[in-house]
Image (spheres, grey):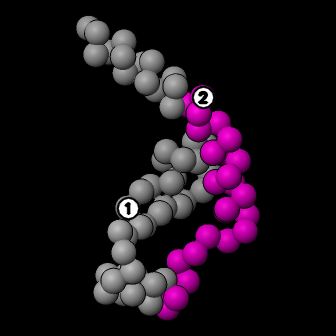
Amino acid sequence: MHSATKYLNGHSDVVAGALATSSRGELWSRIRKMRGQHGSVLGPFEAWLLMRGMRTLDVRVKAQAKSAAKIAAL
């Protein structure tokens, strides 16, 4: 389970997430069924917003790592 809202998006203008399993077992079947029943799939505009935020992911991760290294050195 991953919050795409906070980390991948970077702009705080979309609510999204990702859920993955290691295999297509019973858990995946239950998740897929719920997704189909409840419609919890991103719309095209929300997907575009998420992709827009991911263009700056590299820059943000490098800045976060640099900041963390400074704190760790204290």
> At label 1, which amino acid type do we have?
Met
Question: Quick check: 25 left or right of 61?
Answer: left
Q: Earlier in the sequence, mark 1 or mark 2?
A: 1
Q: Could you say which quadrant of the image residue 19 lies in?
A: bottom left
Magenta-colored stretch includes residue 26: no
State the residue position of label 1: 1
Magenta-colored stretch includes residue 59: yes
* Picture quarter with the C terminus: top left
Can residue 67 be seen in this snapshot? yes
Residue 37 in the image: state x and y as whole percent.
Answer: 49, 91
In the rendered view, would you say 9 is above or below 48?
A: above
* Mark 2 surroundings: few (<14), some (14-19) or many (≥20) residues within 10 A: few
Q: Residue furthest top?
A: 74
Q: Provide the major secondary structure of the magenta segment.
A: helix
In the rendered view, would you say 11 is above or below 36?
A: above
State the residue position of label 2: 59
Residue 6 in the image: state x and y as whole percent.
Answer: 48, 47
Q: Could you say which quadrant of the image residue 59 lies in?
A: top right
* Residue closer to the observer: 69 or 43: 69
* Mark 1 surroundings: few (<14), some (14-19) or many (≥20) residues within 10 A: few
* Picture quarter with the N terminus: bottom left
Disc 1 and disc 2: Cα gap in Å? 23 Å
Can residue 34 be seen in this snapshot? no
Residue 52 in the image: state x and y as whole percent.
Answer: 70, 47
Residue 63 in the image: state x and y as whole percent.
Answer: 51, 23
Q: Residue at 45% across / 84% down in the picture?
A: 32
In the rendered view, would you say 52 is above or below 36?
A: above
In the rendered view, would you say 51 is above or below 59?
A: below
Secondary structure category for the residue under label 1: loop
Question: Quick check: 39 left or right of 3?
Answer: right
Q: Residue at 35% across / 69% down in the picture?
A: 22
**Which range of residues does the magenta coloring cover?**
36-60
